[in-house]
Image (cartoon, grey):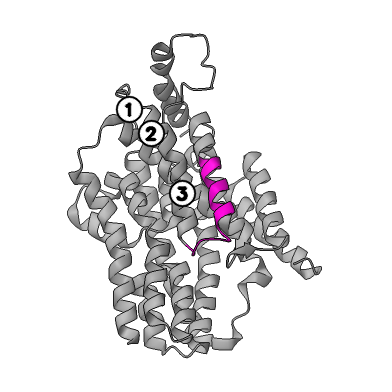
């Protein structure tokens, strides 16, 4: 049973991944659609970042995590190096939790 | 990302390593959680190697432990459906050879996609995808192995604030493309939709729902767009955004994408 779950998940996930890549080769996409693809990808990534920053298991994730993400976002806005953005976000959230902020 | 474009491959490695370190730690927590939930070591490792999708793996372990294997598969697949549009957007960025398309597809994660799409289309983007894809995959699997071996000795990644590291990293990689007004409007609207829908929909659907925000502009611009050959630079929208200098929409539209592309490339 367990092996069936792993095989199904692996095959299905790879199917989604490879389908997009191979479809792109075969589809004759009109220009407007090709121009929309990066917008669509950016929208998906923005939605992922926003839901990951704010929610956990369908509910509000608490204040520590969004606060850390916000610090990272401000640093990125100020053109800080990427490593600093990531470390500052994690550090802020870790510190807040250390001080008891959920 | 702008910072990485300006500097060389070393900076890109360092950027990927920052996310890789976080993935190593979260991978370790996955390994520990899975073994604690009763999964055998081989199954835990096989999941990280062959499924290679963190969110779906955590979810599957929980649902399998709860005795719902079918739900584990369906929920995991729903969560991973977003990879199809990622693949469409990445397309040839994986490389021209067929084996690269087939192997690279497996390495496609949110982070690898974000690292790649943050760079202008061409060899730079391809390199970014492969550097991020390979390193992050190694980090995730090495982490899983550590977690399986260390078991309960692995701490909670939330103590280190790593749950904030991923969204912050994604957002930082996205910022340059959000400087384009139309992309920004669509992406923020989609993100808002996804957050609002999260309490009501099963995991994975809210993020897909964000694509609804793309549909509006898609319908509005069925008119033939100017050929630019650029994938990195979406067109600025005519609607609502005053284009500099021109009243005529077609005339204003023409220089837009080229200008964005040049601005993007000038920094590398």
Q: Chain of mark 2?
A: B
Badge 3: chain ID: A
Q: Which residue is mark 2?
A: B218
Where is residue B17 shown, x and y percent of the image?
51, 59
Residue range in magenta is B187-203
Local packing at callout 1 (Cα closer than 10 Å; few below 14, some 14-19, many 20+) is few
Which one is nearer the viewer's eye here, B155 or B257?
Answer: B257
Residue corresponding to mark 1: B222
Q: Give the CA separation, mark 3 to mark 2.
A: 16 Å
**Other residues around mark 3 within 10 Å, as few (<14) / some (14–19) / many (≥20):** many
Q: Residue B267 lies in magenta, yes or no?
A: no
Task: State if disc 1 and disc 2 touch (CB < 8 Å).
Answer: yes
Residue that numbered label 3 is attached to:
A44
Chain label for disc 1: B
Residue A102 at what x, y percent from top left? 74, 67
Q: Residue at x 54, y 65 (%)?
A: B21
For the residues bearing labels 3 and 1, Cβ distance under 8 angstroms: no
| Percent x, y of residue B236 | 46, 26
Task: Sort mark 2 into few (<14), some (14-19) or many (20+) by Cα contacts within 10 Å.
Answer: some
């Amino acid at each position: 049973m367990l092996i069936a779950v792993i095989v199904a998940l692996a095959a299905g996930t790879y199917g989604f991944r490879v389908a997009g890549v191979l479809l792109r080769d075969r589809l004759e996409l009109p220009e407007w659609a090709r121009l929309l693809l990066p917008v669509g990808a950016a929208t998906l990534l923005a939605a992922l970042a926003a839901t990951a920053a704010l929610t956990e298991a369908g509910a509000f994730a608490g204040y520590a995590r969004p606060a850390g993400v916000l610090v990272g976002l401000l640093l990125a806005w100020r053109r800080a190096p990427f490593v600093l953005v990531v470390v500052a976000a994690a550090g802020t959230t870790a510190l807040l939790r250390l001080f008891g902020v959920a | 990302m702008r910072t990485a474009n300006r500097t060389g491959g070393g900076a890109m490695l360092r950027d990927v390593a920052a996310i890789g370190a976080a993935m190593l730690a979260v991978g370790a927590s996955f390994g520990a959680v899975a073994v604690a939930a009763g999964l055998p070591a081989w199954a835990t490792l096989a999941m990280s190697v062959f499924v290679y999708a963190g969110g779906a793996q955590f979810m599957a372990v929980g649902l399998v432990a709860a005795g719902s294997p079918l739900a584990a598969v369906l929920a995991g697949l729903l969560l991973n459906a977003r990879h199809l549009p990622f693949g469409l957007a990445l397309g040839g960025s994986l490389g021209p050879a067929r084996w690269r398309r087939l192997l690279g597809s497996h390495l496609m994660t949110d982070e690898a996609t974000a690292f790649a799409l943050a760079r202008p289309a061409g060899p730079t983007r391809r390199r970014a995808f492969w550097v991020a894809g390979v390193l992050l995959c190694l980090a995730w699997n090495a982490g899983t192995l550590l977690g399986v071996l260390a078991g309960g000795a692995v701490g909670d990644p939330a103590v280190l604030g790593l749950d904030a590291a991923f969204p912050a990293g994604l957002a930082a990689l996205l910022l340059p493309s959000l400087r384009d007004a139309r992309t920004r409007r669509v992406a923020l609207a989609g993100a808002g939709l996804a957050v609002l829908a999260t309490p009501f929909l099963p995991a994975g659907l809210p993020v897909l729902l964000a694509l609804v925000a793309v549909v509006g502009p898609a319908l509005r611009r069925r008119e033939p767009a100017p050929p630019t050959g650029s994938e990195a630079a979406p067109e600025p929208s005519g609607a609502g955004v005053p284009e500099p200098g021109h009243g005529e929409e077609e005339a204003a539209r023409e220089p837009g994408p080229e200008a964005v592309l040049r601005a993007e490339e000038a920094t590398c």
